Amino acid sequence: MSLLINVEDVENWYPLMYLYRRDLPDSGGAGRQRAGTGFAYAFMPYKAQTMSVANFGAGMTLSATCAPGTQGGLPCPSNHALVRRDTDIHARFAESRLPTDVADLQAGSTFTRPKQGNEMPLGPDDVIEYIVGGGGGYGDPLEREPERVAADVHEGRTSIEAARRHYGVELDATGAVDADATACARTAIRRARKVWPRAADRFPEADPADPVAATGGPPRRLHEAIVARDDGGRRVLACARCDAVLCDYAADFKRHVLLHEGPTTELVGAKADPVDRLDVPIVLRQYCCPGCAVLLTTDVSRAADEPWADMRLAGPG
């Protein structure tokens, strides 16, 4: 059951006019399994003497309150509300030109609506656009089949920029996969990941777990790219792709791999940095295997916060 109300019903209830409501490329998190996309919609007052709008959601600001990625997938970009004042919308109507993007409008001023606050009046020539994020990705985007990425681009789910930056997929002039260029691009992305600093250098474990003795049992999958296995006399967590030992069985693997920390605007599709609307810096953290550079996990958090453990395992007994 969908809670997305028909445009016609909303226009029947309120004195406003929708200019568009459409799927939005890159609004879902990238991953081996790409997330579903979100959407954009824009409206303006219609035959109204006065109109005011207000936001009541923290999700308008911070990706962490939208959809996080899992097991190496990327989160969706944060939502936002963009206001364009004193536009040429009525002149466009007179010429039978309906905009499909607020960026196409001429405007006296443009600003991002804060996540919460007092009501804001809209004038007869003002337009407001909301962007709503999609889901979070699952698994390392570099492991998505290039042909599926090309199909995503063709269907308008993923942009060419995201195909290149997040998936390492290069397309030729016809939109088909350039296999050689894609292989080179993915190798370059993995090589760049391998020089990320060690997470332990920034976030050492304050209370390291005691080693867990080997069980004599077979390897056991715990995560898309992590297995538990014996290594000599101890039980460890290892990469499921290259078999590199990541850490002891009961340790927090995130503190023993490689870490990249950057702004959330590194996500293709992000419209603004949440730091513009919050009191503290917000960062996107990505963690990869030091052996093969497969992306293991991602999170969005305050820059000063310690990483939170994705999983902590207890030894036998």
Image: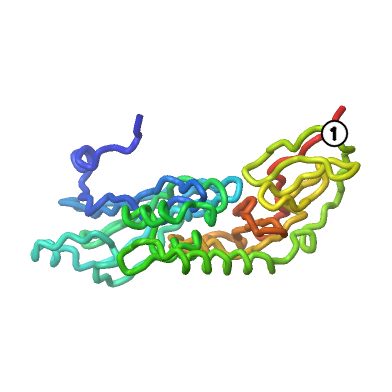
Residue at the outermost top position: 317
Residue type, mark 1 in image: Gly
Residue on which the image places disc 1:
216
Image quarter hosting the C terminus: top right
The structure residue drawn at horizontal position 18% and vertical position 51%, both measured from the top left corner, is 46
Q: Residue 227 or 132: which is nearer the viewer? A: 227
* Residue at point 52%, 68% (across, down): 185
Taking depth in this image into account, of 308 and 34 the one nearest to the observer is: 34
Q: Quadrant of the N terminus?
A: top left
In the displayed structure, does residue 224 sit left or right of residue 162? Answer: right
Left or right of 210? Residue 132 is left
Residue 276 shows up from this direction: no
Q: Residue at x 44, y 53 (%)?
A: 79
Residue 16 placement (x, y as % from top left): 22, 49
Q: Is residue 264 above or below residue 310?
A: below
Q: At which x and y percent is residue 101? A: 27, 61
Residue 158 is situated, as x and y percent measured from the top left of the image, at: 39, 56
